[in-house]
Amino acid sequence: MEDEVDRLVAAWRRERPDLDVEPLEVLSRVSRLARHLDRARRLAFAEHGLESWEFDVLTALRRAGSPYQLSPGQLLTQTLVTSGTMTNRIDRLAKRGLVERQPDPSDRRGVLVSLTDSGRRHADEALAGLLTQERALLGDLTTAQRRELAALLRALTAPFDNTPA
């Protein structure tokens, strides 16, 4: 089965036979898949009244386990945004009643961001919707193929995830 990347690579090989365009065979597909995944994610989140960034913050808190709270610094680490951006996001989520700020009992100057019951419901429902979308994207792959693909992608992403910022 031929795809758009096959056609793109063939054209580059014809036009630039002096270049090794093999990386395009993998990374152009990853890039195209990322665009499809982004659309599926936005759809799943919109069905639950969330934007992607809201889902990221809410699910970071949800994954923390009961009592579903993290410091703003921990949220920064998990969502890869600047402190100014995170402050704005927390403000907006608090205004919607999805999170609340509470004093950090171990640091009188600090705060903890906590998931409200509404925030937890939104996170749980949006995650279920996302998983439905993602299963559809992977539907043509066998379980063994999905595991192999996950391992190969992990080999590519692990160096980025384990590099100090």
Image: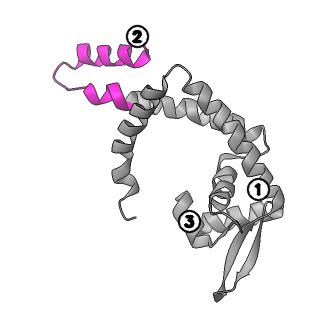
Bin the neighbour count of mark 1 within 10 Å (Cα to Cα): few under 14, some 14-19, many 20 and up: some
Compare marks 3 and 2 and give the one earlier in the sequence.
2
What residue is rendered at 65% in x and 31% in y? 133
Query: Which residue is labeled 1 in the image?
Result: 120
Comparing 158 with 89, the one in front is 158
Measuring from the top left, give residue 75's x and y in whole percent.
59, 65
Q: Are marks 3 and 2 in contact (CB under 8 Å)?
A: no
Query: Residue 104 is drawn in which quadrant?
Result: bottom right
What residue is rendered at 68% in x and 75% in y? 112
Q: Indicate yes or no whether the magenta region holds residue 41.
A: no
Point out the stretch of residues depicted in magenta. Answer: 1-27
Q: Is residue 119 left or right of residue 85?
A: right
Helix, strand or loop status at disc 2:
loop
Helix, strand or loop status at disc 1:
helix
Amino acid type assigned to the residue bearing label 2 in the image: Glu
Q: Residue furthest left?
A: 18
Compare marks 2 and 1 and give the one earlier in the sequence.
2
Q: Main secondary structure of the magenta part?
A: helix
Q: Which quadrant of the figure contains the C terminus?
A: bottom left
What residue is rendered at 69% in x and 56% in y? 58
The disc label shown at residue 76, or none: 3
Specify whether residue 96 is in view: no
Query: Looking at the image, is 59 positioned above or below residue 100?
Result: above
Query: Which residue is labeled 2 in the image?
Result: 2
Q: Residue furthest top?
A: 1
Q: Nearer the viewer, mark 2 or mark 1?
A: 1
What residue is rendered at 38% in x and 39% in y? 151
